[in-house]
Amino acid sequence: MTDDFAVWLYVVASRRDGAAELSTLTGVAGEPVRTVVARDLTAVVGSVPLDVFGEQPLRRNFEDLDWLEATARAHDAVVSAMARRGPAVPLRLATVFRDDNRVRELLDERQADFDAALQLVSDRTEWGVRAYGDRAALTAAVAEARSAEEVGTMTPGAAYLARRRAQLSAQESVERDAAERAEEIHARLVHHAAAGRRQPLTDPAVSGRRDWMVLNGTYLVDDDRTDDFTTTVTTLGAEFPGIRLELTGPWPPYSFAGLTRGPT
């Protein structure tokens, strides 16, 4: 590598899976991707110009949302192509190293971690489930459930008051009720997955959506249980009035196999 270029790391695979034909893949700088091998691991990398992908230029470029989106798509295209060929550990966006030797050092130092991650994601795929709340519908559903417990054989007047009390109570507790439902949905989805994580809720200013997000979950699902998982999402969506579930995927397993150490 010359002083004008650095090494962008996309994904790590086993040596046997990393030998697949890469000639059709290009990276974030339009560069042909290639491999760096250390023992039983293969890193898929690209040589990128420092005047665009160096530390200071990256900070500036990350403020350009169009540039960031295009770069993220190019990065994910390489990761997704490798994930389709076999178990692969995706690296987070902008994992940049000084040269190939630094990449080899990473593979040597973290071989046990990469081996464990490759085993975890083998024959599994990441799916995302987001839950959005409708305050009015959720309040009505909670109020109806609470009043049904009380009304029973009450007189019409007493039943009306019980329903009114339930409505007021539901309006006051709607945030807590949404959180409780989100927690139950997440727990039940984890039961149908190999692993699951609750991610930070997306800021509406970033997503451009005004929907009230109450759950942002990612789930690592066995490929032979995909139908079971997606059916569970549909079932849960019907079971919780006032909560709308949105399924996304399949994705490479970014949430379960990423590198936590920063680039060097």
Image (cartoon, rainbow, N blue to C red):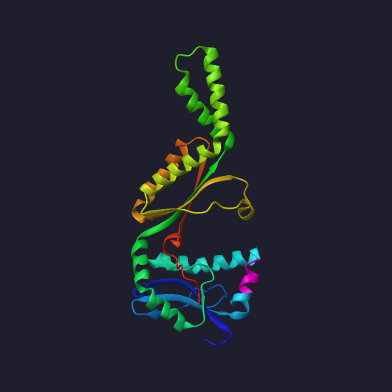
Q: Does residue 33 show up? A: no
Majority secondary structure of magenta residues: helix
| Residue 183 to residue 125: above or below | above
Query: Residue at the bottom extreme?
Result: 2
- Return the x and y of residue 89 as percentages of the image width and height: 42, 67
| Residue 174 to residue 255: above or below | above
Please name the residue shown 49% across and 69% down the image: 78
| Residue 31 to residue 80: above or below | below
* Residue situated in front as seen by the camera: 64 or 259: 259
- Return the x and y of residue 23 as percentages of the image width and height: 47, 77
Check residue 58 for magenta coloring.
yes
Q: Does residue 210 show up? A: yes
Check residue 242 for magenta coloring.
no
Please name the residue shown 45% across and 23% down the image: 149
Which residues are drawn in magenta? 57-63
Please name the residue shown 45% across and 79% down the image: 103
- Return the x and y of residue 120 as percentages of the image width and height: 35, 62
| Residue 123 to residue 176: above or below | below
How many numbered marks does the figure carry? 0
Please name the residue shown 53% across and 26% down the image: 166
The answer to whether residue 16 is left or right of residue 176 is left
Query: Residue at the top extreme?
Result: 155
